[in-house]
């Protein structure tokens, strides 16, 4: 399925009534809140028919230390490990280590700060 264009991202943000702030890459993040970015990622996964394994943001994960916010089972056998952060928050040491280890093992793993960055990871 095709990815969202910059215009579609802007329209999505407008529909959500979001105030745009800007991430590290200069791309808009809906209202600058991590929860909004999580929602946008979940919406895109649903739109594409992907399975997004995602826990509650209200609680710390009680699973693997450093586990990313999303494990996404995409089409064509692709899997993504995604940690979503605002433009100012940093991954914990454990999160950064897990992402680095996943990459070393040949998996696609990334920290994203906007929907556009998420799409770049998924669409390469």
Image (cartoon, helix red, strand yellow):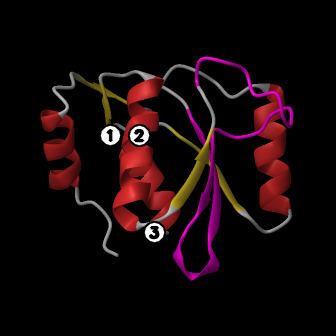
**Residue 73 painted magenta:** yes
Residue placed farthest to the bottom in the image? 76
Counting from the top left corner in percent of width and height, residue 79 is at 65, 65
Residue 46 locus on image (x, y percent): 40, 57
Question: Residue 115 at what x, y percent from top left?
Answer: 38, 45
Q: Position of residue 38 (x, y in %)?
A: 46, 36
Q: Which secondary structure lies at badge 2? A: loop
36 part of magenta stretch: no
For marks 3 and 2, give the CA distance.
14 Å
Q: Which residues are magenta?
A: 57-84
Taking 46 as reference, is 72 left or right?
right
Of labels 1 and 2, the one closer to you: 2
Q: State whether residue 58 is above or below residue 67.
A: above
- Which residue is painted at 58% across and 24% down in the image? 57
Q: Is residue 17 left or right of residue 79?
A: left
Q: Residue at x 62, y 73 (%)?
A: 78
Q: Within 10 Å of the Cα at label 2, are there few (<14), some (14-19), or many (20+) other Cα atoms?
A: many
73 is higher (above) or lower (below) than 32: below
Residue at x 77%, y 59% (from the top left corner) = 103
Q: Earlier in the sequence, mark 1 or mark 2?
A: 1
Residue for badge 2 = 114
Mark 3 burial class by Cα count in 10 Å: few <14, some 14-19, many 20+ = few
Residues tagged 3 and 1 counted as in contact (Cβ below 8 A): no
Q: CA distance from mark 3 to mark 1?
A: 16 Å
Residue appearing at x 80%, y 56% in the figure = 102
Mark 3, mark 1: which one is toward the viewer? 3
Which one is in front, 122 or 40? 40
Quarter of the image for residue 16 reads top left
Question: Which numbered marker is on residue 123?
Answer: 3
Q: Earlier in the sequence, mark 3 or mark 1?
A: 1
């Amino acid at each position: 399925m095709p990815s969202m264009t910059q215009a579609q991202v802007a329209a999505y943000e407008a529909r959500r009534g979001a105030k745009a702030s800007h991430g590290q890459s200069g791309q808009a993040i809906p209202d600058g809140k991590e929860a909004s970015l999580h929602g946008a990622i979940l919406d895109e996964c649903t739109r594409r028919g992907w399975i997004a394994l995602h826990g509650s943001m209200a609680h710390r994960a009680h699973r693997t230390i450093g586990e990313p916010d999303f494990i996404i089972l995409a089409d064509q056998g692709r899997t993504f490990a995604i940690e979503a952060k605002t433009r100012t928050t940093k991954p914990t040491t454990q999160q950064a280590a897990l992402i680095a280890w996943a990459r070393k093992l040949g998996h696609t793993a990334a920290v994203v700060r906007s929907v556009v960055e998420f799409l770049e990871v998924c669409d390469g």
